[in-house]
C-alpha cells in the first residue's frame, strides 16, 4: 500500500475521479469499528471501475446526448448497494446503512441551500430583472472597453451571492448582444466574465459550491473567506488589464428598447437580500446550518407569491406601472400572470443537483472504503501542502471544483487556516484556465454561438495562469498570519 506505484495510482485517481462530500464523525467511527477492509477486495475495485465509468459518461454528455446526472445517480446506487450487501453478509448491515445516511444528510443540506438560491434567481428572471439589466447596459452608449470592464466588474460582484452559471449566462448574453458585429469583443468579454465570475465566487461562501462546503462544515468562519478579497481581485485584474489592450475602442450603437419589470420585481430582490442576511446571521449567531436560513427565505418568497396572487385583481396587468411610467397604452390582450413560486422551483437545474447527489454519494462510498485516506497520506503527508493545494487548483481546470473540494474534505487533512484559504482560492480560480473548467465557461460555450470557443479561451490561458499565481503570491503576503 505504500509502494511508489500505489502512490502514483492514488494521485491519478484523485485527478480523474468525480469527488464528493465530507462524511461526518459518525461515519469515521463506524469505519474504524467495522474492521471490514474493502480497499483490496473485489468490491473496492468494482467501486473504482463504476466511478471512473460514471464520470467519463457524465463528462461526455454532449457526445452521448445523455444528461450528466444519469450515470452518476446510477453509479452511486450500484456502489452503495455492493457495499451494503457485503456488510449485510457479514452481519453489519447497520454500519453501512448509517454511513450512507450520513452522506445523504450532507447532500440534503447542499440541496436545500442551492434549491432556494436557484428559485430566487428564477423568480428574478421571471420578473424581468435580468433583462432589465441587459437593456439598461445597452442603452447607456458605453464604449467596448467600458463595457468590457463593466461586465467584468458586475460578474465579480454578483458572483459573490449568485450562482456563477447564472451570472456568466446573464453577462455573456449582454456581451453577445453588444458585440454582435464585433466578434473579437464578444470573445474577449466572455473570457473576462468567466475569470471574474470564478474569482468573485471564491471569496464568498454564498457564491460557489466549494466555498459553501468549506463554510457548511465549519472549516472556515464566514468572515475568514473575505481574507481572500484582494487575492481574488488580483486574479481578476491581472488578465483583464492585459486583455484590455486587445478590446476594440469603438462604441456600439445604443439600444432603444425599454425596461419592462413585472410587478413585485424590486421586492423579490429585497427578499433575496433579506434571505442572505438571515442565512449568515443565523449561522454566525445561532450556529444553524446555512440551509436553515435559506429555507426561511423560501417561506418569505412563498408568502409574497400569495400576496401577488391575491392582489392581482387590483391591477390591470403586471406591467401597469411600466405603461404609466412611459405613458403608453396597455395592449388589450395583455393578461395578468400569476406568480407561482413552485414553477420557479420546478425550473431549477435539476440535472446539476442530481449530478452532485451522485458525485457526493459515490465518493462518500470511496471514502468509507478507505481509498481517500491513502490519497490524503500522499498529498498532505508526503509532499508539501502548498504544492498539493496549488496542484489541486490546477486540476480544477479539468474537473469541477466542487467535486474536488468534496474529496479533500473527505480526506480530513490537518491543515492550518492559511492552507484551507489557499485551497479555497486555487480551486475557485483554477477553473478559469480552460473553458470547460467551470460552470460559467461551459454555459457560455453552449450559449455563445460565435466568437467564444474552447480554442479561443485557451489562447488566453498563459495570461490567466499569470493571474492564478499572482493571486497565490498576494495570499501568502497578506494572509501570512494564518499559516
Image (spheres, rainbow, N blue to C red):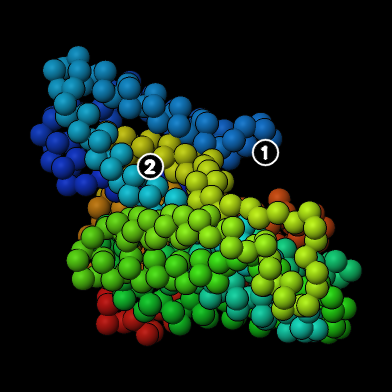
The residue lying at 45 percent from left, 75 percent from top is: 472
| Residue 419: mark | none
| Residue 395 visible somewhere in the drawing | no
**Vertical order, 142 against 138 (above or below):** below
The residue lying at 26 percent from left, 23 percent from top is: 84
Name the residue carrying label 2.
360
Quadrant housing the N terminus: top left
The residue lying at 68 percent from left, 66 percent from top is: 319
Q: Secondary structure at mark 2?
A: helix
Query: In 3D space, how far apart are the residues under numbered discs 1 and 2 (Cα atoms)?
Result: 22 Å
**Vertical order, 177 against 353 (above or below):** below
Taking the image as shown, residue 125 lies to the left or right of residue 116, namely right
Instruction: Tell me the quarter of the picture where residue 405 sits.
Output: bottom left
Name the residue carrying label 1.
62
Quadrant housing the C terminus: bottom left
Considering every residue shown, the one lying at the far left of the view is 33
Amino acid at each position: 500500500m505504500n509502494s511508489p506505484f500505489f502512490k502514483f495510482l492514488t494521485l491519478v485517481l484523485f485527478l480523474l475521479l468525480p469527488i464528493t462530500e465530507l462524511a461526518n464523525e459518525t461515519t469515521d467511527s463506524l469505519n474504524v469499528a467495522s474492521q471490514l477492509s474493502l480497499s483490496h477486495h473485489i468490491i473496492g475495485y468494482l467501486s473504482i471501475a463504476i466511478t471512473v465509468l460514471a464520470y467519463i459518461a457524465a463528462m461526455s454528455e454532449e457526445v452521448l446526448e445523455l444528461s450528466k446526472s444519469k450515470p452518476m445517480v446510477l453509479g452511486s446506487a450500484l456502489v452503495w448497494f455492493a457495499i451494503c450487501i457485503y456488510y449485510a453478509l457479514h452481519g453489519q448491515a447497520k454500519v453501512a446503512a448509517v454511513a450512507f445516511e450520513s452522506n445523504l444528510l450532507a447532500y440534503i443540506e447542499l440541496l436545500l441551500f442551492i434549491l432556494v438560491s436557484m428559485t430566487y434567481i428564477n423568480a428574478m428572471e421571471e420578473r424581468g430583472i435580468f433583462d432589465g439589466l441587459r437593456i439598461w447596459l445597452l442603452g447607456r452608449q458605453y464604449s467596448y472597453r467600458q463595457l468590457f470592464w463593466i461586465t467584468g466588474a458586475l460578474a465579480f460582484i454578483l458572483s459573490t451571492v449568485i450562482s456563477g452559471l447564472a451570472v456568466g449566462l446573464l453577462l455573456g448574453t449582454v456581451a453577445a448582444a453588444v458585440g454582435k458585429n464585433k466578434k473579437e469583443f464578444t470573445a474577449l468579454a466572455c473570457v473576462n466574465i468567466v475569470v471574474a465570475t470564478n474569482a468573485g465566487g471564491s471569496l464568498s461562501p454564498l457564491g460557489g459550491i466549494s466555498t459553501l462546503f468549506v463554510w457548511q462544515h465549519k472549516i472556515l468562519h464566514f468572515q475568514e473567506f473575505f481574507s481572500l478579497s484582494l487575492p481574488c481581485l488580483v486574479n481578476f485584474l491581472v488578465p483583464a488589464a492585459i486583455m484590455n489592450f486587445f478590446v476594440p475602442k469603438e462604441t456600439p450603437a445604443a439600444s432603444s428598447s425599454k425596461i419592462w419589470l413585472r410587478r413585485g420585481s424590486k421586492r423579490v430582490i429585497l427578499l433575496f437580500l433579506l434571505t442572505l442576511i438571515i442565512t449568515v446571521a443565523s449561522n454566525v449567531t445561532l450556529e444553524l446550518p446555512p440551509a436553515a436560513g435559506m429555507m426561511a427565505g423560501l417561506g418569505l418568497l412563498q408568502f409574497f407569491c400569495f400576496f401577488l396572487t391575491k392582489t392581482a385583481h387590483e391591477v390591470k396587468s403586471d406591467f401597469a406601472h411600466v405603461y404609466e411610467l412611459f405613458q403608453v397604452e396597455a395592449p388589450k390582450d395583455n393578461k395578468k400572470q400569476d406568480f407561482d413560486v413552485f414553477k420557479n422551483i420546478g425550473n431549477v437545474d435539476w440535472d446539476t443537483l442530481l449530478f452532485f447527489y451522485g458525485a457526493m454519494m459515490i465518493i462518500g462510498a470511496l471514502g468509507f472504503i478507505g481509498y481517500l485516506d491513502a490519497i490524503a497520506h500522499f498529498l498532505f503527508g508526503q509532499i508539501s501542502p502548498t504544492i498539493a493545494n496549488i496542484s489541486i487548483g490546477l486540476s480544477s481546470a479539468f474537473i469541477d471544483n466542487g467535486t474536488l473540494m468534496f474529496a479533500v474534505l473527505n480526506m480530513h487533512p490537518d491543515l492550518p487556516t492559511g492552507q484551507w484559504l489557499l485551497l479555497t482560492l486555487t480551486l475557485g480560480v483554477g477553473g478559469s484556465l480552460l473553458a470547460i473548467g467551470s460552470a460559467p465557461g461551459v454555459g457560455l460555450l453552449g450559449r455563445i454561438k460565435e466568437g467564444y470557443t474552447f480554442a479561443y479561451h485557451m489562447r488566453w490561458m498563459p495570461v490567466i495562469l499569470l493571474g492564478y499565481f499572482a493571486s497565490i503570491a498576494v495570499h501568502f503576503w497578506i494572509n501570512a498570519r494564518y499559516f
